Image (cartoon, rainbow, N blue to C red):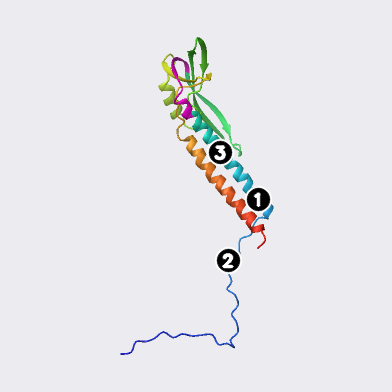
Amino acid sequence: MAIPRPIHRTARPDAPALPPAQPAHPPAPQLPRGARIGAGAVVALLGLIFLLIGLKVRATANAAASWPAVEGIVESSRVVSRQDRDNDGRSTIMYSPEVVFSYTVNGRALKSARICPVESSSSSDGDANATVKRYPAGGRVQVHFNPDSPAEAYLETSAGAAPAIFIVIGLVALLGGGAILFGAFKAGAPA
């Protein structure tokens, strides 16, 4: 039994040329080059701002972890609520803990209300209530203070996930803005 061989067809030299293949979809409209440069610059700048904020907060938290500590007293502890409005005019009630504590450094009496390097608020009062319960009025606390500026002090030295979130958002926006700028400049370069 013979094995069938594939048939090879070649174009005849006198055959008309086929038109070039058309894309299935027309290309998406693009912004003008100047608009892409502006958009890329804005996105990259916002990314840089987020990145710098994240790095600054992380550096502050890392430094605060090695600051000396003294004993302090919680003077007041409560949940504070405020009403925020968004761009659509809708309002949301935001809750945050307010813990005022006093402490003494080198004979100088000081007060602070900074619980940690990153202030937080939430639309739910659960976290704020939990923080207030940890620091009841009249309670004794460890106060971590900046030896170069003792008025800067925190009860907690951790910044939580906030610095990492800011750093990641900053890097993504910085890289995205850079890609937009690269594409805009590459498109304008002579071939």
**Within-10-Å neighbours for mark 1: few <14, some 14–19, many 20+:** many
Q: Nearer the viewer, mark 2 or mark 1?
A: 1
| Cα–Cα gap, marks 3 and 2 | 37 Å
Asked if residue 51 is positioned above or below residue 19 in the image, the reply reads: above
Quadrant of residue 85 within the rendered picture: top right
Which residue does the image show at 59% across and 41% down from the upper left?
A: 46
Which residue is labeled 3 in the image?
Answer: 50
Which residue does the image show at 52% across and 26% down from the upper left?
A: 81
Q: Amino acid at mark 1?
A: Ile
**Within-10-Å neighbours for mark 2: few <14, some 14–19, many 20+:** few
Residues in magenta, as a range: 61-76
Tag 2 secondary structure? loop
| Cα–Cα gap, marks 2 and 1 | 26 Å
Residue 25: mark in rendering: 2
Residue 37: mark in rendering: 1
Which residue does the image show at 49% across and 39% down from the upper left?
A: 165
**Within-10-Å neighbours for mark 3: few <14, some 14–19, many 20+:** many
Q: Position of residue 139 (x, y in %)?
A: 41, 15
Question: Reading the chain from its start, which is encountered first: label 2 or label 1?
Answer: 2
Along the line of sight, which residue is nearer the eye, 120 or 41?
41
Q: Quadrant of the N terminus?
A: bottom left
Q: Position of residue 54 (x, y in %)?
A: 52, 36
Q: Quadrant of the C terminus?
A: bottom right
The single residue placed furthest to the top in the displayed view is: 107
Question: Reading the chain from its start, which is encountered first: label 3 or label 2?
Answer: 2
Q: Position of residue 140 (x, y in %)?
A: 41, 15
Along the line of sight, which residue is nearer the eye, 90 or 39?
39
Tag 3 secondary structure? helix
Q: Amino acid at mark 3?
A: Phe
